[in-house]
Image (cartoon, helix red, strand yellow):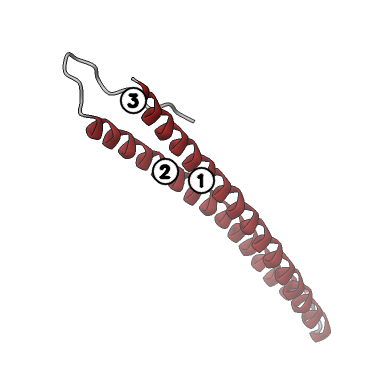
Amino acid sequence: MHSHPEPPRSGTQLLPMAENGQKVVLAAVSLQAHAFKAMMRYQIETLAFLRHRCEQDIKLADDLIGGPEFNDAFEVVSTFLQNAASEYVTEAGKVATLTSKLASEAAGLVRKEARTAIEDIAVRTVA
């Protein structure tokens, strides 16, 4: 992802704790940005699904108006409900897949931040 900028080296050295604090803050901001992106992905997926379902609701109304007999109305509603149930199950699968992907990305980000912190501590210990 993004590399964290080094703290300023202007004549005075920051205390090691202050430097680590900056890195912790930068890591926290990075995680918040990741969470924000994840939330936006969920919203995009949800809104796309809801739009499709609303379009199907309008189609149901049109189909009901167009059918002259009661049996036709029963079949139209039955087909609508069957399709809706199937689409909700499919959407739940998409959300589960998205959740898994986002959790994996977050875990990778945390691992990277931890590895960077460990390497920084090792470099300071050797120096």
> Of 106 and 40, which appears nearest the observer?
106
Which residue corresponds to the image point at 65% horizontal and 54% vertical from the top-left? 97
Q: Quadrant of residue 66?
A: bottom right
Residue 104's spot in the image, x, y percent?
A: 58, 47
Could you tell me if the residues under marks 2 and 1 are in contact, i.e. CB atoms within 8 Å? yes
Q: Quadrant of residue 10?
A: top left
Question: Which residue lies under the disc numbered 3?
Answer: 124
Work out how far the residue at label 3 is from the one at label 2, CA to CA, in angstroms: 25 Å
Work out how far the residue at label 2 is from the one at label 1, CA to CA, in angstroms: 7 Å
Question: Which residue lies under the disc numbered 2?
Answer: 31
Q: Quadrant of residue 4?
A: top left
Question: Which residue lies under the disc numbered 1?
Answer: 106
Q: Secondary structure at mark 1?
A: helix
Say which of marks 3 and 1 sits in front. 3
Q: Secondary structure at mark 3?
A: helix
> Of 103 and 41, which appears nearest the observer?
103
- Amino acid type at mark 1: Ala
Q: Is residue 2 above or below residue 48?
A: above
- Amino acid type at mark 2: Leu
Q: Secondary structure at mark 2?
A: helix
Q: Is residue 74 above or below residue 83?
A: below
Q: Residue furthest bottom?
A: 70
- Amino acid type at mark 3: Arg
Which residue corresponds to the image point at 24% horizontal and 35% vertical from the top-left? 17
